Image (cartoon, rainbow, N blue to C red):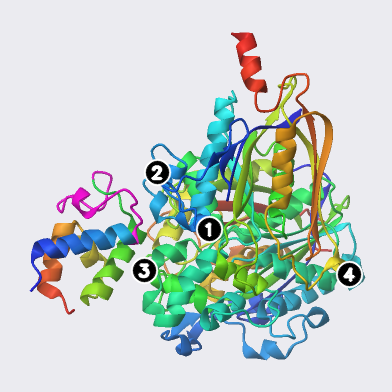
Amino acid sequence: MAIVITGGAKVDKAGVETLHGALIPWDSKVASSSGSWVSGLKGRTFFDTPPARFGRMDAFSKLTVGCAHLALKDAAAAGSESFPEGIVLGSLMGCLMTDIQYYAPVCDKGPEHAGPLLFSYTLPNVAVGEVCREFRLFGPNTVISCGEDSALAALVVAHGWLSSGRASALLAGGVEAVDSRVAELCRGDSNADIRSSAFLFQLERQDEPWQPGLPTILGGESEFSPSGFSIERSVDLGNTGMERMWHMLNMGGRGFRAIDVRDKEGYSSSLKVFIDTEKHGSTTRHRTQIKSAAD
Amino acid sequence: MKSPAVRIRGSGAVTPYGAGVQSLWQGIEEGRPAVSPFSGFENEGLPQLVVGKVPDAVDRLQAFNGLGRDGNRAAFLAGIAIEEALRTANLSPGDLEGPGVALFLSTTKGPISAVERFCLHRKRSGDECMVTPSDLAGLLARTLNISGTVQAVSSACASGAVAIALAADHLSSGRCDRALVVGVDILSAFIVTGFLALKALSSKPARPFDVDRDGLNPGEASAAIILDVTDENSGPFVKGWGLSNDAHHITGPDRHGSGLAHAIRAALNDADTTPDRIGALVAHGTGTVFNDAMEMRAIEAVFSPTIPPVCGIKGAVGHSFGAAGLVEAALAVEMLRRRKVPNTLGHGRCEEEGFRFRGAPLEQDRILSSNSGFGGVNAAVVIGKDDSWPL
Amino acid sequence: MEALQDIEHRLKALLIEALGFEDLTPDDIDAETPLFGEDGLGLDSVDALELVMILDKHFGIVIEDPEMGKEILASIRVMAEYVLNHRKK
């Protein structure tokens, strides 16, 4: 039995990229690249035919749903025959951006200006709900929040659920959607470099014999250090564990890799992965090679 | 669920009835709801509302290790619940320290005051570092000196049951020896304005599952349970859990209840039990037309023809969002201890057949507690005991 | 006095903005298309609350009764006619 990664996608200020595909930089026609790119996401950024609901969603949900769509497409294009039953999402900031967007007008103008639709999005779980609704995921799902790399912790949870048979395939990863107001609230500096991004991977449990060459998650841990707290927060904040993981998966090679993240709140997570692209070509092309060998 | 058994060693709560699980039980037994008219949000331009507010007398209590002395109400309420959980678990604070202990926090908005203050003043107040649920979980972990896994769970109003599920999973897979699961949410203008905009509030005390129900009462509360693993055959135990998503609508539940039914069946399977062995259901029962209709459909689908007695507490204490699932778990433990199913306060009658909402003896030693939340999430937990408990 | 057509145009624009329909312009929406249900624009109950807010904020019309709300929000045409006859702003 192995827990493998069969697809993935990332969305950040550079553009959109899938695990088995190339980076597509932002095109100013589909998303505003000035200011906070995450505020200018359009359905066409991610979908050939955007879902009807896409425009109603807040930025956090758009980012999550768009990234999920790309990750699912990537896994299918790379030859996966499984489809996720659920999703585990990690996010430190959650929907803070939406919280402020919702409540600032209420403060300024009164509760008659409380938007019911926007209020619906003031829970990060609703982004998970939009993913489940759009892609018909009926199984286990949750959002966890545990410091600056909540996404890595989400992969650990997903690994556990897959290993114990709660699901046979899951989406897992993390999303941070932040703008200058969130930066001002959390860091006292509206120009602080806290980066928006989304990383989602399709994880599957494969029973023996499993597909060789796929990155395999061996396990991980999430811990806390009570004495590790520092009032000096990172000015620089993003999905650092996910960035490292993405880089590691794209580098390829053969052997064990570990991704460790520790933040200034005291949270830490680690993930152990085994990759093996030497025998079967790079991660980004191994599926195609296997498929063509079978043709 | 895999062995070893996950035992609920202690539980604590603070609700609109005051501090203590016993005050919650007593209040429900005496048939007096603790929700009441509240005008505390006048400054925010809100009308008088019926809410579940923790009484002012509780503010004079000391929470665990001074939590909340700085005005952090969510930390304060959590500290009161943790204090009782430790006491009833017969543990000292030192027993919750170290890498073998995990903490799971269930909350929807956590320390929401930071966002409210920011929106009011448009700038950060001082060294604001209590903003997210993760910050609150970190504070609790530091106060208790917990160094195992610490996570805040955000599954909307289902967070309580989800947090219990994650903790049970952690314990049964050997990743920790002990787990503290805390649920808390405070009354806030943020949440109240939103539910008003959704027209989901009732102007009267909520009436779960009643034919004339017309909305929920927002509330605040905190509850905590301490879990560990044991070979002893006492109890009560978390026997199993199940999670699902309706995949239907982000705020409106799937009217057929199939999502919740799926979670309930998954929990029953995981607990290696069957519908006829469940002695009572602790339902989510918010008092809204759609949630309660969905739940009854789901319950019918799983349990017909013999539906166990159903109990809901949101007519008594309101809907405390992230705390709800933990308060309901603490209640389930009390139901097992006393072998009794309490009345569902606020319920008068319903037209659906086969449902019992009146107090009754608990005839089987398994209880199923479920919660559902925005985003279509459903979570169910089976809590049970064996004959040798209580001693 | 604002003509029915102009009210319809305004309502369409406000609906597009409130519900984030990126690819629609007011001219793309037929005034008689049902707003709710699968045969129409496919709006749901939360969208309905947003439309009720639009009627309040922009035209001073308060709808308290959900049953009445369903009738008035049937289509842009029906909404515009109601605005013509009941507006306070």
Mark 4, residues whose alpha carbon is within 10 Å: few (<14), some, or many (≥20)?
Answer: some
Magenta residues, dominant SS class:
loop
Task: Give yes or no for contact between labels 3 and 4 (Cβ–Cβ under 8 Å).
Answer: no
CA distance separating discs 1 and 2: 23 Å
Mark 1, residues whose alpha carbon is within 10 Å: few (<14), some, or many (≥20)?
Answer: many
Q: Which mark is residue B91?
A: 4
What is the magenta range? Answer: C18-39
Could you tell me which chain the residue with mark 3 belongs to? Answer: B
| Residue at the disc numbered 2 | A51
Amino acid type at image mark 3: Asp
Q: Which mark is residue B212?
A: 3
Q: Is residue C72 left or right of residue B155?
A: left
CA distance separating discs 2 and 4: 53 Å
Comparing A54 with B57, the one in front is A54
Amino acid type at image mark 4: Leu
**Residue B200: horizontal and vertical position, in percent?**
41, 69
